[in-house]
Image (tube, grey):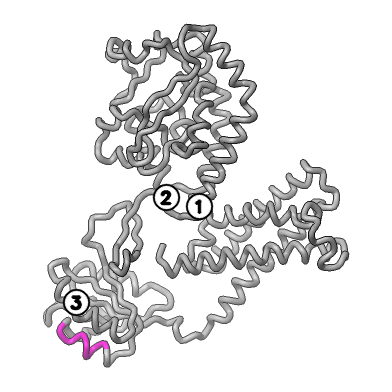
Amino acid sequence: MSRAARTVGLTAAATDLFLLVAAYFGAYELRYHMGWFPGVYNWDRYLLLPLVAIPVWQTVGWSTGLYDGRRRGFGGEIARITAAAVAGALVLAAFAFLLKQQHQSRPLVVLYMALAWVQACGVRGLVRLLAIGRPDEISRVIVVGSGEGAREICQKLAGRRGVELVGVITEEPDGAVPAGLRRLGTLDESEAILRREVVDEVIFSVHRGRLADMEHAFEVAEDLGLDAKICLDFLPHRTAKLDFEELEGTPLLSFWTAPAHPIQLAIKRAFDVVVSATALVVCAPLFVVIAVAVKLSSPGPVFFGQVRSGLNGRAFRLWKFRSMVVDAEERLDELRAKNEMGGPVFKLSDDPRVTRVGRFLRRTSLDELPQFWNVLLGDMSVVGPRPPLPDEVKQYARWQRRRLSVKPGITCIWQVSGRNEIDFETWMKLDLDYIDRWSLWLDLKIFVKTIPAVLLGRGAR
């Protein structure tokens, strides 16, 4: 996401936040005719709904791309706003029912979300209406280059709304120009051309060996106040996203493949803290029961700690309820020939090292509960690829190691898709697919799907 797009997205998010607050007071007045500010400090009566609606609306907005700052059709904007409004209405109706807030009735919830929807759509429609006829809506663009990359850029620009392709500046006098476009001159004549033509933006797409030759033309565009862009198709990025930043005045191009949006990651971390803290408190009596069962089933400690590889290879100690005999790791070598999983991972359905209680804990995934402590500490997330052993990571193919580019999790796509019934390579591909498609909505879907997967014990060993 570019800096301009990020600014547009944050502005839209802030605007919706304001509208959600205003819509609530408007809905309350329309519903009860009690005046605009009666008892405004009584938050339970007057502010509970917006306190719930705002994070729900914003979460859905960020997840669906409503606030990514991209230019899209009005219909696409309306669809995303509708998704946020419907999600908000469902959550608010559930809160009103569960908390038995009689004054916050379901008609009020519907009126509130309807008014918020109308306002959000109206603001976006007004912005588009005011933008009609603005001179900067038609951007006049010149492409610099004569290779295959420049030709592809011209083709893409030709079909873009709001763009007028002025012509092409070639690197050499005999450089190829796509049919139907003007040859404006050569790279050496760029200053005169950019002074002569009415142009808003210059896109450089030259061979990597000619990058130094375009330095003068780039400086000319900067001095003339024109937007200048450099096509980086010669850089080997296939799945990575691209952004620009500065390091104390030094320009840097950033490439990344892992999720990097700060607001969405902050929401994910807040979700992790709330869920893990709640799980540890609610499951405390169950912890006691399991601890007694583990202690009585075989000699040894209640908990089993093992070093795992976390974010980008950071080592941390993962905790489980002990489900094996105490010398399980020493006996691993004698069982390797019976491994039922390909790759560096060891899985055995009838592992003799597993205790009777441990077999039940594994089948029900209760042995994983202490990992909520790892989540609370920040070493893990609720949703993410399962943390591997360092020795397994050493045997990864290069493309497989990218699964360490996000925090490991308690549950993941592999966990809800059959776990040990899936071969190693498919498991790795599922994790990478999760990283490439990550969103808060995807995390929520995986979290919900984990419940029946655990209850049914699908793929558990």
Residue stretch in magenta: 188-194
Task: Please tell me the numbered disc located at residue 264.
Answer: 1
Residue on which the image places disc 2: 259
Which of the marked residues, 2 or 1, is nearer the chain's N terminus?
A: 2
Q: Which residue is located at x 44 percent, y 20 percent?
A: 304
Cα separation, mark 2 vs mark 3, equals: 34 Å
Q: Quadrant of residue 284?
A: top right
Residue on which the image places disc 3: 215
* Mark 1: secondary structure: helix
Observer-nearest of 6 and 322: 322
Q: Quadrant of the C terminus?
A: top left
Q: Is residue 116 left or right of residue 414?
A: right
Observer-nearest of 42 and 122: 42
Q: Is residue 238 above or below residue 185?
A: above
Q: Is residue 454 left or right of residue 207?
A: right
* Mark 2: secondary structure: loop
Q: Position of residue 427 (x, y in %)?
A: 37, 33
Cα separation, mark 1 vs mark 3, equals: 38 Å
> Type of residue at label 2?
Pro
Q: Based on the picture, tell me whether residue 193 belongs to the magenta stretch.
A: yes
Cα separation, mark 2 vs mark 1, equals: 9 Å
Q: Quadrant of residue 184?
A: bottom left
Instruction: Say whether marks 2 and 1 touch (CB < 8 Å).
Output: yes
Q: Quadrant of the N terminus?
A: bottom left
> Type of residue at label 1?
Gln
Q: Main secondary structure of the magenta part?
A: helix
